[in-house]
Image (tube, rainbow, N blue to C red):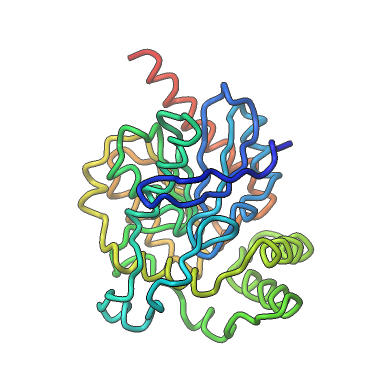
Amino acid sequence: MGMGEEIARNVGPGGIEVAYERFGDPADPPVLLIMGGGGQMINWPEGFCAELVDRGLQVIRFDNRDAGRSSHFPDAPVPDIQAAMAGDVSSASYTLSDMAADAVGLLDALGLDSAHLVGLSLGGMIAQTIAIEHPGRVLSLTSMSSTTGDPAVGRPDFAAIGPLGAQPEDRQGYVEWQVRVLRAVGSPAFAFDEAAVAARARQAYDRGLDPLGLMRQSVAVLASGDRTARLRRLRVPALVIHGTADLMIDVSGGRATAAAIPGAKLVIIEGLGHSLPRELWPEFAAHIADLVDVTETTTSTT
């Protein structure tokens, strides 16, 4: 279905390598899927990408820096999460602005003037940052299971995720740990597809795991501050999707995002956690396609 994985080189101001894959007709409106912390492009399931393609969209998914087969930064300072949470972000190697510039650089590499952005979790923060810093490149913004950077909203439930422990180094241990973690932060109202989660975890392990990369991404978030005031100045068609059962980013983060972005549509889903349950792929895709249709119609008539 996809055209296979490719590597774009010398991407953006950082001159990094970005692994990506395109689905659908290159003549259709482009949707750039931006994954969350430590996630890889495979965390956007092919079946979900197919739902978007079936609705007349072309889909691009990619590995963020420090994830999967894109450039990693092993020589960077060791990220200190505790210090960063306490306000000392001196161990940050980069910020969300750098990750936003990577994504815009990928659009350049693909010859795309602009795209519809769909970001999940950390990906939502990157998508928001692109809309703030590169507004001319953004046709619409969909922020899923994400937040504004205001520390008063969207807090994780550390009691729920704390006991899961550190990521094991061996493949089988990692796969079992990933199943445990994703079950814990998943969606209580929807089926947990353990086989699919385990298969993706094996694939992620084989494509390249980087626990410090996830920590560098996390410190980047903390170093980037609160976007609320800048979100209020956005003039972009926007959709915010969040679940009531999200333990990683509380639903208050989604509510605050939608409240900040003028005219944003807010979709709250009962019993959705920090996951992409198969049962909701058609609903997610329909919301995104509706936003794209409205945007494309408005753009072509103005």
Residue 300 picture location, percent across and down: 40, 15
Image position of 170 with respect to 36: above or below: below
Nearer-the-camera pick, 97 or 283: 97
- Asked which quadrant contains residue 24, the reply is top right
Residue 145 picture location, percent across and down: 47, 57
- Residue at point 33% right, 49% down? 129
- Residue at point 59% right, 59% down? 68
- Asked which quadrant contains residue 90, the reply is bottom left
Q: Classify the position of the C terminus by image quarter.
A: top left
Whether residue 246 sits left or right of residue 51 in the image: it is left
- Residue at point 66% right, 72% down? 178
Residue 58 picture location, percent across and down: 59, 31
Residue 52 picture location, percent across and down: 62, 35
Image position of 93 with respect to 174: above or below: above
Image position of 179 with respect to 296: above or below: below
**Residue lying furthest right in this view?**
195
- Asked which quadrant contains residue 99, the reply is bottom left
Image position of 50 with respect to 267: above or below: above
